[in-house]
Image: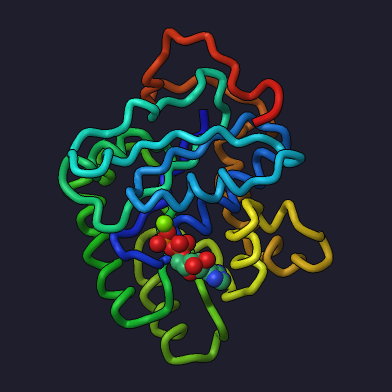
Amino acid sequence: MLSLLVINSKGGSGKTTVTTNIASYYAGKGLKTAIMDYDPQGSSMQWLNARPAHLQRIHGANAAPAKGTALRSMKAWVPNETEVLVIDAPAGAEGLLLKELVRKANYILIPVAPSPIDIRATANFIRDLLLVGGARTSTVKIAVVANRVRSHSTTAYVALERFLNSLKLPFLTSISDSENYLHAAQNGEGVFDMDEMATASERQELMPVMRWLQGYFPNRFGVRADDKVVSLESSMKYSAYRGGK
Ligand SMILES: Nc1ncnc2c1ncn2[C@@H]1O[C@H](COP(=O)(O)OP(=O)(O)O)[C@@H](O)[C@H]1O
Ligand SMILES: [Mg+2]
């Protein structure tokens, strides 16, 4: 199973936007896709609830702690036959939670918005991810994307580009600040579910992420088992992907 963790300690950096668009891309390609939402705000789960029934189904696993407790929900399982799992991280993940998230992933994508505050927070976060989260000593692949880019000539973008290029991590792409992402977020869609002509630039700017992940599928979409992700109900022979919602 391809398992992609989308994470940044900073809220509003684009974790949910990236999560939902990548998940809907693979679902649209016919892969059995699930989203695990660790954020108590539940934005990915709300997006799934809004997803139109005619679109390919995406399984939702709510991994956020129940309100008022530190315990995670028992609903946080993904079907055994899942081929692509995208994990939407909460803001501010640290310590044991950060370790747990890293352990579940074979790819980690870090979206960063062009602002001095986001850049500083992300620099600290990447250090934590490598040292506290254990990503430095793991085989997990890590990359960064710029998100909500309005123009490539603003001071904020130039500073972000300089920062991302200074990291020893691949800087995959710049995702534009676009109404289409807002529209998609509201309607339970990804840009790949929307009109192809109207979303041509968003599709194009997201493709470097898929190409990076494609390294996981050596024979195109051939799939192999992976034990890095814990299937919480591994004994369950449940086919959540058959039929409608
Ligand atoms: N590239 C983008 N273009 C337009 N709006 C975006 C873009 N990325 C994020 N947003 C919007 O910004 C807000 C925060 O993004 P979100 O993906 O929820 O961040 P996070 O999950 O990191 O908190 C949301 O309202 C989202 O729809
Ligand atoms: Mg979010």
Residue at horizontal 56%, vertical 19%?
81
- Please tell me how many numbered marks the rendered image carries: 0
Q: Is residue 174 visible?
A: no
Q: Nearer the viewer, residue 182 or 160?
A: 182
Q: Position of residue 120 (x, y in %)?
A: 26, 74
Q: Nearer the viewer, residue 66 or 169?
A: 66
Residue at horizontal 46%, vertical 83%?
157
Q: Position of residue 99 (x, y in %)?
A: 23, 40
Q: Quadrant location of residue 101? A: top left
Left or right: residue 100 compared with residue 184: left
Q: Quadrant location of residue 181? A: bottom right
Quadrant of ligand 2: it is bottom left
Q: Quadrant of the C terminus?
A: top right
Q: Position of residue 149 (x, y in %)?
A: 53, 78
Q: Nearer the viewer, residue 144 or 194?
A: 194
Residue at horizontal 65%, vertical 41%?
26
Left or right: residue 141 compared with residue 116: right
Vertical order, 231 against 145 (above or below): above
Vertical order, 92 against 177 (above or below): above
| Residue farthest to the right, as pictured | 197
Q: Nearer the viewer, residue 95 or 239?
A: 239
Vertical order, 215 against 205 (above or below): above
Left or right: residue 9 compared with residue 84: left
Q: Is residue 216 visible?
A: yes
